[in-house]
Image (tube, grey):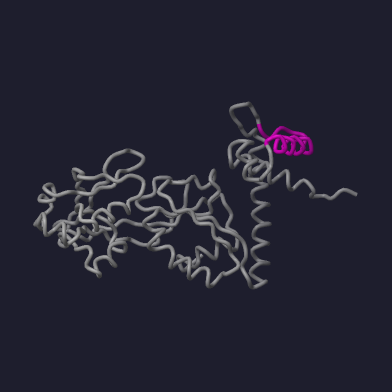
Amino acid sequence: MSRKYDHLGDVETFVTVVDRGSLTAAAVVLSTTPSVISRALARLEARLGTQLLRRTTRSLALTDAGRLYLEQTRTALCLIDDAERAVQAEGGEVTGRIRISAPTTFGHYRLPAMLHEFSQRYPAVKVDLNISNRNVDLVADDFDFAIRQGALKDSSLIARKLEDAQLVLVASPAYLLRRGLPRDMEALAQHACLVFQLPRTGRSFPWQFMRDGEEVDWTPTPAMEVTEDALGTVSLAEAGLGICQTFRFIAQERLQRGVLVEVLPGLQGRSRPFSLIYTPQRRMTAAARAFTTCLLGQP
C-alpha cells in the first residue's frame, strides 16, 4: 500500500522552483541537481494529470493550473510549519537555524549585544551572520533576515524599525589643532572631508544636518573617498586625516576617550533608521519568530 502523501517532497520542490525562479537555483537550495528537480516536477505533473509550469531553457511560467495549485499548496505547507512551531513551543526549547545579513556599521556596533541576549535566551538556535554592505537578495541568497539603513525602497519586503540612529560630525584633536575648528556648515568646504562612496551609484554619500529646524543634505567635496566599508571614514578621521560624519553609536566610545571630538554640535540632530527586513513569502520558523521577538520585543 502506497502512502497517500509520499509526493510532498515533489510539492516542496515545485514551490521552491517557483520561489527561486529556476531549476538551478532550486537545486542549490535543496542540495540536489537540476535533473533531480526536473524529474520531481515531471512526477508531480503526471500525478495531477496537468501541466504546472511552462519551461524553456531561459524561463519558467506558471500555467493557470499551476497558479491555483501553488496558492493551495503554499497554504498547506504553511499549516505544516504552524504545526511544527506549536510542537516546538510545547517542547520548551527552541531549536533551528537563522541566517542574518547586516551592514558593517550595525553588524559591529549594535548587533553583537542583541545576539548575545538572543543566544542566552535561545542557546539551541544556530545563527549564521553575514556582515557586509552588499544588499543581499533575501530569497536568492537564502537569508531569513537582513538589517538595512535608510528608507526601504522594495515594497515587497516587510520592514520593522530597530532604531533611529543619530548622526554626528567628528574629527581628531590633532586635525582640528592643525586646521582649526569650522564655525558653520559653509566652512566645511575648506576642510578635508572624508566621505563614503555609495556602491550602487558611485556618488558621495551626502552629509545630513538639522539647521534652524530644517533638514539639510550637503554633499562635501571629498579629500578622501572610502568605498565598500563606511567604517573606514571613522578610522581615517581618528588618524587625523579629516572630518567625517558617522553614527553617534560608532563614535561614542572614541569621543569618551578623546581620540575624536564632535564638530558643529549645533547642526546635529538628523538620524537615519535601521530596520529588520524579511520577506512575507517565507514562513517564520520558531527560531525566526524568537529572533524577531528578541530584537523587537514583539512577534
Q: Nearer the viewer, residue 232 or 239?
A: 239
Relative placement, left or right, of 278 versus 79 is left
Relative placement, left or right, of 249 versus 298 is left
Residue 250 in picture, x, y percent from top left:
31, 61
Query: Most extreme residue toward the right, as rendered?
Result: 1
Q: Any magenta on residue 36?
A: yes
Which residue appears at 18% of the width and 43% of the height? Answer: 221
| Highlighted range, magenta | 34-53
Q: Main secondary structure of the magenta part?
A: helix
Q: Nearer the viewer, residue 222 or 58?
A: 222
Residue 22 in picture, x, y percent from top left:
61, 36
Query: Most extreme residue toward the top, as rendered?
Result: 57
Number of marks in the rendered image:
0
Vertically, is 5 above or below 160?
A: above
Q: Nearer the viewer, residue 75 or 203?
A: 203
Which residue appears at 19% of the width and 56% of the height? Answer: 210
Residue 99 in picture, x, y percent from top left:
54, 55
Q: Any magenta on residue 214?
A: no
Relative placement, left or right, of 45 versus 125 is right
Residue 128 in picture, x, y percent from top left:
53, 57
Which residue appears at 19% of the width and 51% of the height? Answer: 216
Vertically, is 59 above or below 96?
A: above
Which residue appears at 46% of the width and 69% of the height? Answer: 297
Vertically, is 17 above or below 85?
A: above
Relative placement, left or right, of 204 versus 86 is left
